[in-house]
Image (cartoon, grey):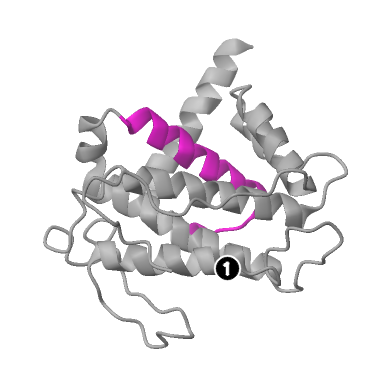
Amino acid sequence: MSFLFQNKNSRTFKPRKKIPEGTHQHDLMEHAAATLGSGNLRLAVQLPEGEDLNEWVAVNTVDFFNQINMLYGTITEYCTAAKCKVMSAGPKYEYHWADGTNIKKPIKCPAPKYIDYLMTWVQDQLDDESVFPSTIGTPFPKNFMSIAKTILKRLFRVYAHIYHQHFSDVMSLKEEAHLNTSFKHFIYFVQEFGLVERKELAPLQDLIDKLVDNDKEKARAQR
């Protein structure tokens, strides 16, 4: 299943991952949306009382996948093989793709190709009922948290590429507030449950510190 666009005017990745209505995970997703609406991201990412951590991580991983789909979809006309010859996050960080199955030895490729590989790989994980079960009572695999960590680590790289290589494009589209809110939500979530190692976040550490410090200042001002 390829995530490359069918035409130049397509604005979002296809397909969007949906959580079936009537499932407990759908209820959790509704809860997450409601708490996000309060504007308190620290509160929004916390595990709801009595809920299963694996399910909470699964629902939020699907949500971040969809958010990043949409955000990257807005700037694909700027992210081309000619302009982004490598998948990078600034001059110090370059990413090579390997999935351990189809591509075992990391390969250097243009950013849009890397992101296509990445999003297709994530979609395959989300669609696998043995990894992301959608029916109540079906257990998560014992290594689920390890899989989720790998997915989130790789999704972070798309944020990092957008910020380092395409932030001026995001600003020209007036999407920076949406991008910042989505990224801050992502950071608060992975920090809450220790899902992405600090060294992996290094390309955007200054931005992360700034976003978190701004929230702390706002909280102090409201006291």
- Disc 1 element: helix
What type is the residue that disc 1 sits on?
A: Gln
Mark 1 nearby-residue class (10 Å; few <14, some 14–19, many ≥20)? some
Query: Residues in magenta?
Result: 175-198
Residue lying furthest left: 82
Task: Please tell me whether residue 184 is drawn above or below residue 16 in the rendered image.
Answer: above
The x and y percentages for residue 163 are: 30, 45
The x and y percentages for residue 99 are: 45, 78
Look at 60% across and 45% down and name the residue there: 189
* Quadrant hosting residue 175: top left
Task: Please tell me whether residue 219 is drawn above or below residue 55 in the rendered image.
Answer: above
Look at 73% across and 63% down and name the residue there: 133
* Quadrant hosting residue 116: bottom left
Residue 188 belongs to magenta span: yes
Quarter of the rendering occupied by the C terminus: top right
Q: Mark 1 points at which residue?
A: 125
Q: How many marks?
A: 1
Question: What type of secondary structure mainly makes up the magenta span?
Answer: helix
Residue lying furthest front: 6
164 or 212, which lies in front? 164
Look at 20% across and 48% down and name the residue there: 77
